[in-house]
Amino acid sequence: MKIEYTKQGDYYIPNIVAPENITNFNLGKYGRMRLRFLKEQKKAEYAILLMNNELQKHLIEINETATNRFDLLMKQYAEKENITKELKANNQMEWVCKMNNIKNCVEEIIFRELIYV
């Protein structure tokens, strides 16, 4: 990859142009969280992904992986804790409490393993 520069006064400024293949894409919750983490905490990794035109692909991949992992873990934890539709029908508050606990545990796993690394 060759970077060209333009001299402005005493400084050389890189001629950076956004790649043409960038399209509007919608990131989910986890993709946006990963983007924010990269921008704030991993600036070098963010810059490398951006310069190599791999940021969009990386964020979409993280978002899809995290969403699929969330769905799978929620299902597995609900089965393990014996949270059923009958519980939801008979005692909604207990069902909500248990599902919120599972959701918090699952999101903590996703954050630790995929988002904040």
Image: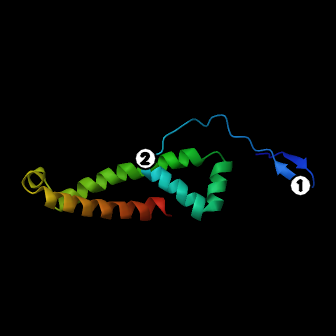
Does residue 1 appear left or right of residue 116 in this picture? right
Can residue 63 be seen here?
A: yes
In the displayed structure, does residue 51 sit left or right of residue 42?
A: right
**Which numbered disc flags the more N-terminal residue, 2 or 1?**
1
Task: Tell me where residue 116 appears, x and y as whole percent.
Answer: 49, 63
Which quarter of the picture shows residue 98? bottom left
User: Hey, what amino acid is under mark 2?
Assistant: Glu
Q: Residue at x 9, y 57 (%)?
A: 91
What secondary structure is found at the residue carrying circle 2? Answer: helix
Could you say which is closer to the camera, residue 61 or residue 83?
83
Q: Amino acid at mark 1?
A: Tyr
Marks 2 and 1, how far apart in space?
42 Å
Q: Is residue 102 above or below residue 3?
A: below
Residue that numbered label 2 is attached to: 64
In the rendered image, residue 62, in percent from the top left (x then y), is placed at 47, 51
Q: Which residue is tagged 1?
A: 11
Select label 2 or label 1 by which is in front.
1
